[in-house]
Amino acid sequence: MIQVKVDKVHAKYKKITILGHALYDDYGKDIVCAAASSIVTTTVNGILALDKGSLSYMISKKGMTVNVKNDDSTTQILVGNMVSLLKELEKNYPANIEVK
């Protein structure tokens, strides 16, 4: 199962941690992992294209951590949209992804 942990401080996104594998299908064929990866990668790349200092990220074998450094409305809206999309994915595949 993919586990997404969302950390907020004073209603502002600060850190998003994505760990694990969806186990919907074999590696390379897993549509839930592909969807989650696309959502996160597209959001991170879009935010960095607007402001390279607005966030940082680290990828490991276990997953990815996104640290939100900027409280501006654009960054917060885009990160919020990413979380909303991950929650929609969770509604459709509750056995494969959990957003906290």
Image (cartoon, rainbow, N blue to C red):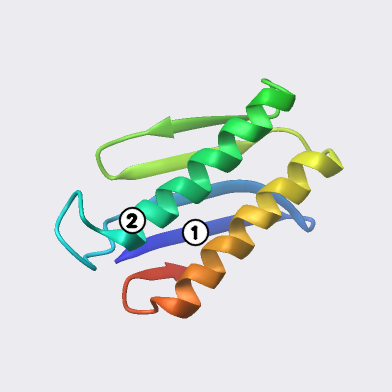
Percent x, y for residue 80? 69, 55
Q: Residue at x 58, y 62 (%)?
A: 85
Percent x, y for residue 61? 25, 38
| Label 2 vs label 1, nearer the camera | 2
Given residues 49 and 7, the one toward you in this image is: 49
Q: Based on the displayed image, in which of its 4 quarters is residue 23 positioned?
A: bottom left
* Above or below for 17 versus 52: below
In the figure, is residue 61 to the left or right of 26?
right
Q: In terms of sequence position, does the residue under pointer 2 or pointer 1 come before the other?
A: 1
Q: Based on the displayed image, in which of its 4 quarters is residue 87 positioned?
A: bottom right
| Badge 1 element | strand
What amino acid is labelled 2 in the image? Cys
Percent x, y for residue 83? 60, 59
Q: Is residue 62 visible?
A: yes
| Badge 2 element | helix
**C-beta proximity under 8 Å, tags 2 and 1:** no
What amino acid is labelled 1 in the image? Lys
Residue at the spot of label 1? 5
Q: Residue at x 50, y 32 (%)?
A: 57
Given residues 65 and 43, the one toward you in this image is: 43
Q: For the N terminus, which image quadrant?
A: bottom left
Q: Residues within 10 Å of mark 1 (few under 14, many from 20)?
A: some
Q: Residue furthest top?
A: 52
Percent x, y for residue 48? 64, 26
Residue 33 is marked as: 2
